[in-house]
Image (cartoon, rainbow, N blue to C red):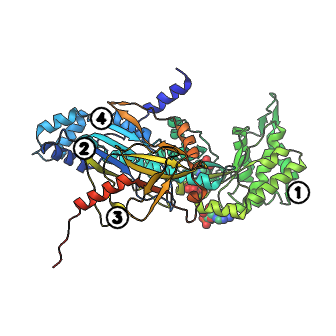
Amino acid sequence: MSSDKQNNVKEMARQNGIVQPLLTDFYQITMAYAYWKSGKVNDTAVFDLFFRTNPFHGEFTIFAGLEECLKFLENFYYSDSDIEYLKQTLPATVEYEFYDYLKDLTCKDIKLSAIEEGSVVFPRVPLLRVEGPLIIAQLLETTLLTLVNFASLMATNAARYRMFAGKNVSLLEFGLRRAQGPDGGLSASKYSYIGGFDGTSNVLAGKMFNIPVKGTHAHSFVTSFSTLDDIHSVSLRHADCSRQCDFLKMVLESRERISEILDVSPDEASDGELAALISYAQAFPSGFMALVDTYDVKRSGLLNFCAVAIALNECGYRAVGIRIDSGDLAYLSVLARETFKRVAEKFDLPWFAKLTIVASNDINEETILSLHEQGHSIDCFGIGTHLVTCQRQPALGCVYKLVEINGQPRIKLSQDVGKVTIPGNKEAYRLFGADGHALIDLLQRSSEPAPEVGQKVLCRHPFQESKRAYVIPSKVEHLYKVYWNEGRICTAPKPLAEVRDRVQSSLKTLRQDIKRSLNPTPYKVAVSDNLYNFIHDLWLQNAPIGELF
Ligand SMILES: Nc1ncnc2c1ncn2[C@@H]1O[C@H](COP(=O)(O)OP(=O)(O)OP(=O)(O)O)[C@@H](O)[C@H]1O
Ligand SMILES: O=P(O)(O)OC[C@H]1O[C@H](OP(=O)(O)OP(=O)(O)O)[C@H](O)[C@@H]1O
Ligand SMILES: O=C(O)c1cccnc1
Ligand SMILES: [Mg+2]
């Protein structure tokens, strides 16, 4: 087996243990019993899973969570202890044959069609279409929603950070400590990576999903050292030979020289901080990355870092960079870059000017945009709280609605037109313009022929009669593939790295004005003329006619 395949198998095998049939709302099980009791065991249904509004005041969403949905279908069965628990929890009047029915239940008769994971998606276009026996399709509702909602929200949030940070900056996810519990933290790491982050500090996510694990060190490492006497050993082995260097002496000498260049007195710098940086460098001479804001970036952190980095260079190692975690990140990063440039010039070490500058501390979308406007020298953002808690919008509102029962369309009416469901079994197509950009998503009845390249197609707003347009597509993408059918995965979900690439390639198909931060242009989602008439006929059939006296 190729190592790619092995990795794929390994990834697929990793089902989050908490995802199981009882991870659902109680009403799914009570409904299952009521369906069963009312003779609906052989009824077949079609459910659509979709959202109504894009998150974060944006006009696009990234669809994620499909692979986990497939693992859920694959492993769906009620264990003996699940059945035991349900017997204790449901009323004693529930007939015992229902538990026998549940015991044999699997997803073998379910068919799941979905949009490719990592694609940009839009309101009202179903992300998943679930077809099969009514009872089992109903029982899947809550778990599928919980698997798609947070995954898609998180991937969208991360993709937005990626977009606004730009290509030249790397992004690290540092959020585990602030996430909504352990499972929220793990999912956040996974879907941040899909959305375009370059690495995570979350070690378990690294192991489970093969995400690069990255990090620096905390303030506590610095504050645990008080004086130079705290240094355990003064020496460091030279990179090229077994010779031991008197590392402490070299650091102190370079600190003297650098203090003149930077016009900062070594007396102002913290010796405790220097002891900490020396100790970290001795532990990781080839990966030295230091936190420099514990006491004072300008007067202590930068001087101490440069002193250790120059001494490391004399021992044959190249330092990696610094992290700044407080203060004015624009000003301090520019100051750090100027400092590195001056040292690079004086010591004739061009690489020193390009040392990595990581910034962290409550970073969000606005901070990144503002820092870009101000000008900064940051190479990498470490982002926790705002990213993983999706502070700007903590939930995506995907819903799961019945659109067909036993071949008959179903519509859910609402005073709020936006909440009226689009009935029937449908197909979704993305129509592209001549310049390669996506123009519109078109929903049609499944019985209609697919739109064709070069052929004029009438696209209608689902609820506003006067809003319509003819589109002549240059390319037509059928959005659904069948992923699960006849009890097995029939289209293998892509490995994480490919889903991550898909996010970027899919985002490229969107016009810039749809992706901008402030007042983005909405992307159009339309229905065919046939589907429009079908919706509105059914609407009239189902809407009661009021009487006025
Ligand atoms: N140049 C900047 N422009 C806009 N926002 C910034 C800039 N520099 C930092 N910030 C943000 O401003 C906030 C500053 O945080 P805060 O007021 O807690 O101060 P602090 O620097 O962290 O102080 P402390 O030393 O107490 O940690 C953070 O959210 C940070 O991301
Ligand atoms: O700010 P976030 O985006 O959530 O990123 C993660 C934060 O976690 C770490 O310290 P922590 O916040 O635990 O302590 P500190 O604020 O005192 O640095 C790190 O230094 C960041 O500040
Ligand atoms: O490695 C880091 O620098 C890190 C990790 C988690 C949270 N804050 C920072
Ligand atoms: Mg903090």
Q: Which mark is residue 407?
A: 2
Q: Is residue 269 among the parts visible in the rendering?
A: no
Front residue of this view, candidates 329 and 286: 329
Nearer-N-terminus badge (2/3): 2
Residue 422: which quarter of the image? bottom left
Residue 396 pos. (x, y %): 42, 55
Which residue is the site of mark 1? 260
Front residue of this view, candidates 59 and 259: 59
Which residue is the site of mark 3? 417
Q: Residues within 10 Å of mark 4 (few under 14, many from 20)?
A: many
Quadrant assignment for the C terminus: bottom left
**Residue 129 as seen in the image, left or right of residue 176:** left
Nearer-N-terminus badge (4/3): 4
Determine whether the residue tagged by mark 1 lies in a helix, strand or loop: helix
Q: Which mark is residue 107?
A: 4
Q: Which residue is located at x 73 percent, y 59 percent?
A: 376
CB atoms of marks 4 and 1 within 8 Å: no
Residue 86: which quarter of the image? top left
